[in-house]
Image (cartoon, rainbow, N blue to C red):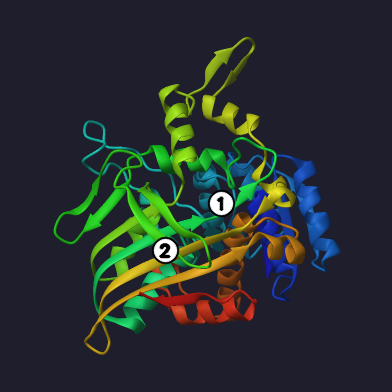
Amino acid sequence: MRVLLIGAGGVGGAFASIAAKRNFISELIVADFSLEKAQGVAREAKARGLVARAEQLDASQFEAVLAVAKKHRVDAIVNLCAPLFNPPIFQAAFEMGIVYLDTAANLSEPHPTEPYKQLGKPLGADQFAAHDAWQQKGGLAITSIGVEPGLSDIFARYAFDHLFSSIEEIGVRDGGNLQIEGYAFAPTFNIWTLLEECLNPPIHYSKAKGWYTSEPMSHLEVFHFPAGIGALECVAVEHEEVLFIPRYVDAERVSFKYGLGEEVVDVLKTLHKLGLDSTKKIQFGDFAISPRDFVAAALPDPAKLGDRMHGITCAGTWVKGIGKNGLAREVYLHHIADNAVTMREYGCQAVVWQTAINPVVALELIHSGAWRGAGVYCPEHFDAVPFLEMLAAYGAPHLLEER
């Protein structure tokens, strides 16, 4: 399988390192706006035994993406850019009728008059609207196949199919105890994405009310995480799972909450108050730049913080309902990434590694034929068992905690 990897940031580098341990990719073309970054990821992939080459690419330009994909006659495009770049990359894959994967859906648009009550244009709307056209073309697109969204959705489908006869609530819960030495504040993943998720109106779902929204970082709760992480305050943020899980899983309620911590919440609220989360460009001297891009440039690159990072991160899906035996049941399906392990074995920090391993697994399942089809889908569409089995074969099994 010839794969075009677009995005040579932290997740892109982790994707290449993980894929190099498998043998289903015949050639990896690494593309990025920064040729230097693309060359660095390709060089590391080659050092790990993968055939790889680099390309400079402006992913905002559909024709440029299509030209690189055609030049290398790729079978799949893996989009590991910020979701702002999804539309042209998605369209290029459609034109070629090939496989497309990303780790976050197209951006949403808040409701114009009641953003904290009603759903506007939801995440991924344009992608799913193209389903019939993709089916006719014969291409396969899977959106949001990272860890959250992605593995969390697969956990929900697995619980529905194999663990429960009826589900009262599904709650995706993310937390960790990662510490970064030497910085007063340093995000563990892309700050642009963090601001987008946390400052947009969070989405909630109930079978009675459908989808609705609330104030950013609301619905505070304390959730107890395993593996020594302990109790963390979690808040609701905008996330794909709340939109996607009800498509395939019958549950009374679905929610998503991050264990961000009080300090991160305060920083994000301050940036919002100052307008530094805005994506609209402002003029500064001879330059025009959006405040959010400036903040992202001013903060340290999360991909380069692995040697300063200590601890673990946990991503999981909590499910409550009636088990297959007719008795009440409550479980937390989760996945742990230890920064010391990911740095030692893959040379990348835990958060980006935990995101990157899932599109690699999905791509191998497509290559083997275990996952197949034509159209635009979210992870819940597919059988969860082959995915979880292959995740274990990669040496990264999931865990199930009865509660």
x then y, percent, for residue 101: 54, 60
Q: Is residue 288 above or below residue 194?
A: above
Disc 1 on helix, strand or loop? helix
Q: Is residue 201 above or below residue 364?
A: above
x then y, percent, for residue 370: 52, 81
User: Which amino acid type is shown beneath numbered disc 2?
Assistant: Cys
User: Which amino acid type is shown beneath numbered disc 1?
Assistant: Ala
Question: Taking 386 as reference, is 31 left or right?
Answer: right
Question: Taking 294 as reference, is 114 left or right?
Answer: left
Q: Give the residue drawn at x 71%, y 57%.
A: 348
Q: Is residue 208 above or below residue 203?
A: below
Q: How many residues crowd mark 1 within 10 Å: few (<14), some (14–19), many (20+)?
A: many
As drawn, the label of residue 342 is: none
Q: How many residues crowd mark 2 within 10 Å: few (<14), some (14–19), many (20+)?
A: many
Disc 2 on helix, strand or loop? loop
Q: Give the residue drawn at x 45%, y 69%.
A: 374
- Rounded to the nearest angstrom, the CA distance separating label 1 from label 2 is 19 Å
Q: Which residue is mark 2?
A: 378
Residue 148 visible to an observer of this rendering: no
Front residue of this view, candidates 270 and 292: 270
Q: Which residue is mark 1?
A: 92
